[in-house]
Image (cartoon, coloured by chain):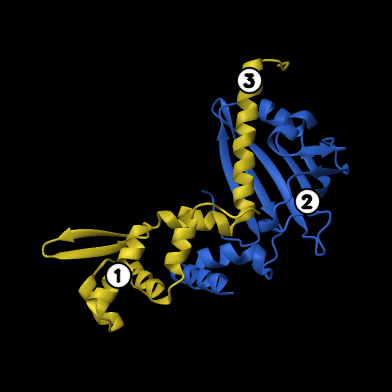
Chain colours: A blue, B yellow
């Protein structure tokens, strides 16, 4: 598990035994994106493209099911960066999601970075805060959650 | 959400942690392993009460015991807490699941070999 010290960022890295070219294809082809993420509407790997995703609502993450995005940056075959905001949230989070591809042997290491978590938002931050302070506080906070 | 038929492992861990004394015991064990006696002295509790709490913590896997010499020693086992961590961090779990799905798509398109070099 990759954990960054910065509480505003989730960073996960994952190795795939496939060349970067193929990973890039899966990251940027709408029909393939639909198979591992959600079905995009209007996506092109071109900076400035506005598009959306429709997926399963996820109440635990305060997610309505529709996401408004814009392609922020494209480095062909290496990095895709998009903005990511809940289209129906009353306080849209200014999230940025990026995928960075690093060739590794015959495969590819993908670094996913989801940034822009608000350090003052309790829901967004609870796990980080708690994890950073050790198990005793995890327990305390769980006690509060259960007691409320 | 429909009610669940059966308590999951996470439910059981949460229930164990819902008790403040058990959280204090866990907190103390985080500092290193202890015997029941040491715990009882620290919390000014009768040994059977401490043993009862330890049994709950042990049953859900948060604490493991091992016998050394005449005494049973207890220490924290962090594994059940990982599930809680996943529950606490829905975004991280979300992206892990999506990245796993990406791997499956990659395996698929590789088998089909339908992509130009």
Q: Are marks 3 and 1 in contact (CB under 8 Å)?
A: no
Mark 2, other Cα within 10 Å: few <14 / some 14–19 / many ≥20: many
Q: Residue at x 64, y 34 (%)?
A: B102
Answer yes or no: are tags 1 and 2 on the same subunit.
no
Q: Residue at x 59, y 49 (%)?
A: B93
Judged from the image, the secondary structure of the residue bearing numbered disc 1 is helix
| Residue drawn 22% across the image and 58% down it | B66
Q: Which residue in the structure is indicated by mark 1?
A: B52
Q: Which mark is residue A130?
A: none
The quadrant of the image that shows the C terminus of chain A is bottom right
The chain ID associated with circle 1 is B
Label 2: which secondary element: strand
Observer able to see residue B76 = no
Question: Which mark is in front, 1 or 2?
Answer: 1
Alpha carbon distance from label 1 to label 2: 49 Å
Residue A144 located left or right of residue A113: left
Locate residue B72, reporting x and y percent: 19, 64
For disc 2, the marked residue is A84
Upstream in sequence: badge 3 or badge 1: 1
Classify mark 1: residues with Cα within 10 Å, few (<14), some (14-19) or many (20+).
few
* Relative height, residue A22 to residue B13 (above, below): above
Residue that label 3 marks:
B110
The one nearer the camera, B12 or B63, is B12
Position of residue B103 relative to residue B87, above or below, is above
In the image, taking residue B98 as reference, residue B66 lies left or right, namely left
Residue B35 placement (x, y as % from top left): 22, 69
Q: Tag count in the figure?
A: 3
Residue B65: % across, % down: 25, 60
Q: Tag 3, which secondary structure?
A: helix
Q: Say which quarter of the image contains residue A73.
A: top right
Chain letter behind tag 2: A
């Amino acid at each position: 598990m990759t954990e960054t010290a910065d509480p505003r960022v989730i960073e996960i890295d994952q190795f795939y035994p496939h060349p970067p070219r193929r990973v890039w294809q899966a990251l940027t082809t709408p029909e393939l994106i639909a198979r591992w993420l959600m079905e995009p509407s209007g996506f092109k790997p071109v900076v400035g493209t506005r598009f959306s995703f429709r997926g399963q609502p996820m109440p635990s993450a305060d997610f309505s099911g529709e996401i408004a995005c814009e392609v922020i940056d494209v480095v062909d075959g290496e990095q895709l960066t998009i903005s990511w905001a809940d289209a129906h949230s009353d306080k849209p989070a200014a999230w940025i999601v990026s995928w960075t591809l690093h060739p590794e042997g015959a495969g590819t290491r993908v670094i996913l970075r989801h940034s822009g978590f608000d350090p003052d938002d309790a829901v967004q931050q609870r796990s980080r805060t708690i994890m950073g302070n050790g198990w005793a506080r995890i327990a305390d906070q769980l006690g509060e959650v259960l007691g409320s | 959400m429909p009610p669940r038929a059966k308590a999951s492992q996470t439910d059981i861990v949460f229930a164990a942690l819902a008790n403040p004394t058990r959280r204090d015991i866990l907190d103390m064990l985080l500092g290193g392993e202890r015997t029941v006696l040491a715990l009882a002295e620290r919390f000014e509790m009768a040994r059977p009460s401490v043993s009862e709490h330890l049994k709950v913590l042990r049953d859900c896997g948060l604490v493991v015991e091992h016998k050394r010499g005449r005494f049973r020693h207890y220490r924290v086992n962090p594994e059940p807490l990982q599930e809680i961590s996943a529950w606490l961090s829905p975004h991280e779990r979300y992206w892990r699941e999506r990245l796993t799905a990406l791997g499956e798509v990659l395996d698929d398109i590789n088998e089909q070999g339908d992509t130009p070099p």
